[in-house]
Image: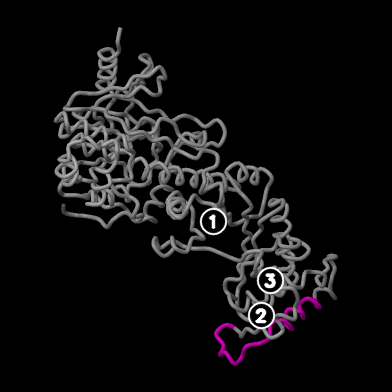
Amino acid sequence: MSNKLPKPTNSLVNPLLTDLYQLTMVYSYWMSGRENQEATFELFFRKNPFKGEYTIFCGMDEVLKFMSNFEFSKSDLEYLQSLPVFADCDVKFFQEYLANLDCSKVKLYAMEEGTVAFPKVPVMTIVGPLGICQLLETTLLNLVNYPSLIATNANRMINAATKMNKKKAIMVELGLRRSQGPDGGFTASKYSVLGGFHGSSNVLAGKLLDLPIFGSMAHAFIMGYRSLDEVIDTRLGPKGSPSEEKKKLLPLVLKYRELLDSDNDDDILWSSTNDGELASFIAYASCFPDNFLCLVDTYDTLKSGTLNFILVSLVLDDLGYKAKGIRLDSGDLSYFSNEASSLFSTMGKKMNKPFFSSLDIIASNDLNESALHELNREGHSITIFGVGTNLVTCQEQPALGCVYKLVELNGIPRIKLSDEIEKVLIPGRKKPYRLFGMTGSPLIDVLLHKDEKSPEKGQRILCRHPFVEHKRVAVIPTEVKPLHILVFDCENGVVHETPKLMDSRSYVLDQIKTIRPDILRHIDPGQYKVSVSESVFSELHQTWLAENPV
């Protein structure tokens, strides 16, 4: 196979990462000579997550790696043959069929990585022999569900955090320690950035994905110091100076403490801050003077942590360095951030130190989408949000619910019926298009039959609700975008390169700018319409009647 990609990032992603029933079904296909019948499967979801109205499709790169390297190993086949369920099965199924099985007869059509997707619209269409296409189901779902969920969760949090004054907040993923295992942590770091986050605390993700990584300090570092005696000889030289010019930091810091105490017109007790905390800040500043970012809530956020940060940052400024800011990890984040910002402003004017106006105030503390909206309602001065647990675990909705359905076999449309209308399958192989209006925003997605002529801009097209006959609309689009690209082409392998991560991130953010604001609302969002052509509508209802028992 040409254009073969490296193996999947996780070595567990191989043909055995599947459900047992996939293998038993394929054995039955093989026994009845049906394994090579041409099948079309569609991978899609029925409902957007987080009570929202959009989803960001992700996972394409790992899907392509998996398909490029699909091959049962000798030990895989030996294991399968040892299972009781296969004890009486024909060994040729393992030694001849599975042993030689790959994706060289499969075509995969998919949305571009990071495409904003909507229910019922296939994010992938898989065309090829029934046997191999059936075996791809579980793994493809696994590789798409969680990445798409994470990217969507991240993007919703960005939208929540940037409502205030329309200013873009910096968003950082901090969830590695709370994620579901190493793979969950790595995947969350990757796809939260694709969804729009600016970086992660995950060092391995930084190395493997070339992501910006962020970090400061933990409470343990601060609690590890008890007195100023522990930093008596801690030194730092002016920026760019030789090492022999290093100065002791403690006397410089204490000089500012005495100065501010003696000129105290704001009732701040500078000499009453926690000495152990101040010592830890001095120690950290000596090592990272240009990345001086302090956690300030170990003892008292406003009466100790923020004051100690100010004292050390003043000294760093005198030496030619620029402090980064503070991190709040508990308490009333709105109140503390506003108070800290006010204090920075006062100190900047009082000490004639312009750097105070550019300090960051970072907030963490179990943030989620609702908390971000609440902070905006209350008003705050936070410039960077660090989000962990609620991002990587998707606590509000832990699964997306993508499905993988057979829609056509040997050119004949197949349908799955249900008493729940949303679970009725739209049969036949389809081509999805997005139609745009005069403002540049998407108007509607429409599914066309595989053999239908593509819609054209400026030309009228009738878009029908798939299940309600009287619901239809005529659209004259100003732009028509095919949503599927051929990404994997049989023996040619990968024929469309997955964009780089940061390019996909930009693609996501550019699309979000064009989506109607009501669709992005946190509460009671507007619904984006997904429709079908007249041909698909007719085929759906004809197949429904043909397959539904009277």
Position of residue 4 measured from the top left corner of the image (x, y, whole percent): 21, 55
Secondary element type, mark 1 = helix
**In the displayed structure, would residue 387 be above or below residue 470?**
below
Q: Can residue 108 be seen by looking at this rendering?
A: yes
Where residue 536 appears, as percent x and y from the top left, is: 27, 22
Q: How far across and down, in percent of the image, does residue 181 sit?
A: 47, 52
Would you say residue 240 sits in the magenta stretch? yes
Q: Amino acid at mark 1?
A: Arg
Which residue lies at the image location 30% right of the left edge and 45% below the top edge? 16
Q: Which residue is mark 3?
A: 224
Q: Quadrant of residue 274?
A: bottom right
- Mark 3 is surrounded, within 10 Å at the Cα level, by few (under 14), some (14 to 19) or many (20 or more) other residues, namely few
Local crowd at mark 2 within 10 Å, few (<14), some, or many (≥20)?
A: few
For this orientation, the residue located farthest to the bottom is: 244
Q: Earlier in the sequence, mark 1 or mark 2?
A: 1
Q: Which mark is residue 177?
A: 1
The residue carrying mark 2 is: 318
Total marks in image: 3
Q: Nearer the viewer, residue 417 or 452?
A: 417
The answer to which quarter of the image holds residue 142 is top left
Mark 2 or mark 3: which comes first in sequence? 3
Q: Quadrant of the C terminus?
A: top left
